[in-house]
Every structure is written in C-alpha cells, then in structure tokens.
Image (cartoon, coloured by chain):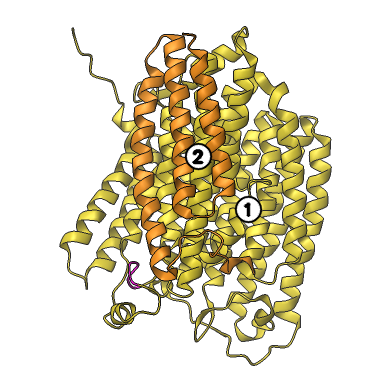
Chain colours: A orange, B yellow
Amino acid sequence: MDASNYLYVSALLFTIGAVGVVVRRNAIVVFMCIELMLNAANLSFVTFSRINGDLDGQVMAFFTMVVAACEVVVGLAIIVTIYRSRRSASVDDASLLKR
Amino acid sequence: MTFTAPVLSYALLSPMLILLGGALIGVLVEAFVSKALRPAVQLTLTLGSILLSFMQLWRIRGEQSLTAAMGSVVFDGPAALLQGSILIIAFISVFLIADTENFTALAAALPGSDEERHALQSGNQVTEVYPLTLFAVSGMLLFPVANDLITLFVALEMLSLPLYLMAGLSRRRRLASQESALKYFLLGAFSSAFFLFGAAYLYGFSSSISFSGIREAIVGGGGNDVLLLIGIAFLSIGLLFKVGAVPFHAWSPDVYQGAPTPVTAFMAAATKVAAFGAMLRIYYTVFANAQWSWTPVLSGIAIVTMLLGSLVAIAQRDVKRMLAYSSIAHAGFLLSGVIALNKAGLDATIFYLLAYGIATVGAFAVVTLVRDSSGEVTDLNRWRGLGKRSPFAATTFALFLLAFAGIPMTSGFIGKFSIFSAAYESGAKGVVIAGVLSSAIAAFFYIRVIVLMFFTDATEDGTSVEIPSILTRATVIIAAVITVALGVYPAPLLNFITDLAIFIR
C-alpha cells in the first residue's frame, strides 16, 4: 500500500483534534483532542521515516511520547485543581479574567 | 557490532547542566530539609546555580563554531548572548519570586478552605517554585541553542511545563490564578501540537531532523515545496504563540493578569528572549533560503501585532493587562528585527531583547509594591497620585514606561532605533512605518499612566505602597540602572554584540 495514505490519515486525525479543541467545552475532552493532535504528528513522523528510509522520525516519535506523558501529568494536575474549586471542568465557566 | 559513545562536549553544555543539577538538588531539598530552613536554602541554591551557570557561560563565550551533543546543540556568539540575557533576567526575577507574599501557602488546598487558612497560619510556603524556575530557565537556555527538531521540541516543553504550573500559584485571587494556568496550559499544548506537526512535515521534506540537513534541502531545492510550506507555517505558529504575536496572543493578557506578578515578570521577559532566540536561529539559518515564502506573511503578522497591541492597550484599566498588551506590541517590534534578515537586524534584536526584558522585570517589580489590605492593586484608577505617596515606586515605574515607549536616554530608544533602521535597510518599509506609528500610539498610553501617577490627586481608598523588601528593591534598582545605562552609553554592549553575534550554520 502507498505509504502516503498514512499521511492523509494523520492529517485527518490532526484536523479532528484541532476542531475538537475549538468546539468542545470540557477541559478533559479538549485535552484529549490535543493528545490526538500530538499522536497525529507522531503518525506523520513514522510515515515520513518509512518513506525517507531513515530512523530519525521514529526516534522523534519516542521523544514525543515521553513529552506528551509529562504534559498529561501537568495538565491533569491543573484540571483537577480547577475541578476541585469549581465542581466543573468546563472551559466556559473559567471566565473570571474576561473583565 | 561496536558501540561508539557519543561525544557530548560537557563544557559547552555546562551552563544548562549546572541549572538542571541545581533544580534536582532543589527537589531533594524539598524532601529532606526542614520547613523552616527551606526558603533560605532554596533561594541560595537557585541564585547560586544561576550565578555559577553565568560564570561558566562567561568562561566559554569565546569558544565559537562548536557543536555539542553530537550536533544537537550549537554554541555560537548569538547563543552566548541570548543565554547570558536569559540568566541575567532570571537572576533578578528570582529576587521577586523570593518575596513570599505573592505565592499561595498550599497549592493543593481549595481556595478559602480551612486547609488553606491553616497552611497560611503555620507559615507554609510553596518553595517548589524555585526548582520549577530552574527547570524553566534551563529549558530557556536550551531553546535558542537547539540544533535539531527533537532538541527544539523538548526544550520548548521544558520551558513551558514549569511555567504552566507556576501561573497557578498566586496567593490572592486563587481562582483567577488557576484559571490562567488552565488557559495557558490548554493553549500552550494546542500550539505545541501545531509545532510538532510542522516539525514532522519539515522532516518529511528534508529527510533530516537536524537544522543543517533541513537547510541543505532548502538550498538544494528539488524537494516537495508543499511539505516545506506546511512545515514552515505550522512550526511558525508554535513559535509565534510563545512570543504572543497576533493572532496567537489571546492567552497573554489573561495569563499575565492571573499569574502571580513575579511569575508574570519572569515569564514575560525570559520566555520572550528564549522564543525569539530560537526564532532568530531558525529564520536566519534554516529558512533563510526560503525567504520568499515567509517574509510577506511574517511582515503582515508584525504589522498587525504592533498596531493591535498598541491600540487595545489604550482601553485597558488594569496595569497588568496593559503591560500584557504592551508586550504584544513589543513582540511586533521584535518581529521586524527577525524579518530584516541581516546582521544589523540580528544585533538589534538581541540588544532589544535584553533591554526590553530587564525593563519588563523592573515594571512588574513595581506592580508588586502597590497594595491594599487584600493584596496587589492593579486597577489603574487607584494608581492616581502614586507619585506623592511613593516617589520611589512612581519614578521607577515612569522610567520603565518611558523605556517601553522608546524615549531617548533609555534603553528602549536605542533598541527601537536600531531595530527599525535594520528593518528599513532590508527594505521592509511598510513594517517600519507601522512600527513608528504604533510607537506613537503606545507612547500615548504610557504617558497617560505617568500623568495619572504624578499629576492627579490621590483618592483615599486604602491603596498604599509597601516598603519594598531588600530583594525587590534590588530588582527595581538594578533594572532601572541597566535601563538608563543602556540608554546613555550603549556603545560597549552594542560593540560586544556586533563582534559576537554571528550564527554558525
């Protein structure tokens, strides 16, 4: 199968993630959409690695996974504190700073 | 199969390694040192690591044209200058962070709960903020010296993740602070996803993740330009977000306002240096030969950023929000140095970053001083007559505002003059016209604040000016002295930058 098909899948996943970030209201779901975008980028890396015939892209994908894991830790910590003080994880409720 | 050990060149990495070591020791201090001693130990450790790192940087500044860690990191003149600027800014920001009044007593406690009151009464302090600062600073040092896409991405996250957490640690207005952390985090992660996607396409275009490999692929031509353009566009979105350029600026007013003021000072100044440092390296070396594709777009973004930042700042009633919009305008001015794409532009941008960063830390340091019984007063109306109540705070704040406005005899004038002349030289006349115009607009609201402080009568509403602690006073004075010194006698630093600032490719 032509490897470039994976690029289309990756672009599709990235778009779904980006649209999700914009339209969804729950912070957890927004965050999941961001993870989807990161994984779409990973899929591109691995596909390009296959097309180009070298391993750099796969190494990059590993680094991305590690960084994404760190991001989950920080992100969930922030979302949980917000949820504990507001009893809601909706990004629309957090509007104290809009003057 | 034989295994070849990588050559790391520890000497060139040492400024970053010292900071990371200090941060790790800081984490251990959290675990093993008694609560009473912790603040002093952490402060000494943090300042010590930054100082040691700076001394090491000074020692290796001449060692140019060198790559470290198997080509993942490149150490050249601009790298030394940018890292030095970041360390100086971090050093004086840590003085502000040491002022305990600004941070929550227990970050995990619910705002307004018994737990929180108990922590406050027992004199608890969030000393974790010091290791977090050190981690962020080491990421910032790595960002402008990264020489491949992996290092660049890891450095971006290294500097961002601690800042997301630090934004949520404010003592007063906890909910607003947590909210700013959430906004910063979600938008920051969103933009790094774009950044990563762009990196993937650059790798697809050039089949190399190193900057030199991408550059050769661009110079050589023959690759798929669609991949290159998607790569440049998405990577730029990630970088422009970090510097707060329009249309990726939405986070900055909220985060600047909600975060504890010392963190705002540190973030506003140091992140800008790091992010523009990386931008300079990427646009001046990697993308230089694809200039046709990005200069027009970036010029447009610079013009919109300058004008929108200055215009919206006029309408602000809150000091921190006003400074946030002013920082957006400054991101536009700095972008004109990136667009210039010549040696003068490089020198001017590096000078401007240092001058602007130091004035920013100074300005936010003054903001921490103006308080009433419930904490900092950031409403501009209540700053009326500050000049009579506290000549020290009002005078220094006026000085920093004049530096932002670019009035002669301050560092801001030299910075603006050199950056616009570099942009003019490169033929970006539209950008220069927009820049001068928005400088004039910006001068209006800076001067308005000065008039408010000195020439209007104070209202009795309980706003008072705190007697600054020694460390805060030191920050304000150091920042003020450097701002004036760079304005009156900038030649030594300008010459130093001109001699040193040459990118190796």
Q: Position of residue B439 (x, y in %)?
A: 77, 53
The secondary structure type at the circle numbered 2 is helix
B400 over B425 or under it: above or below: below
Q: Is residue A35 left or right of residue B253?
A: left
Q: Which residue is mark 1?
A: B250
Tell me the residue at 71%/39% (across/down). B336
Q: Amino acid at mark 1?
A: Ala
| Magenta-colored span | B105-109
Q: Position of residue B399 (x, y in %)?
A: 65, 66
Q: Kindly tell me whether residue B75 is visible in this rendering.
A: no
Q: Kindly tell me whether residue B392 is visible in this rendering.
A: yes
Q: In front here: B204 or B409?
A: B204
Assess whether residue B12 is covered by the magenta stretch. Answer: no
Q: Position of residue B401 (x, y in %)?
A: 67, 64
Q: Amino acid at mark 2?
A: Ser
User: Residue B318 lies in what quarter of the image?
Assistant: bottom right
Q: Position of residue B446 (x, y in %)?
A: 73, 65
Tell me the residue at 65%/29% (across/down). B343
Tell me the residue at 63%/30% (across/down). B233
In terms of secondary structure, what is the magenta stretch mainly?
A: loop
B371 over B175 or under it: above or below: below
Quarter of the image that includes the C terminus of chain A = bottom right
Protein chain holding label 1: B
Q: Which residue is mark 2?
A: B192
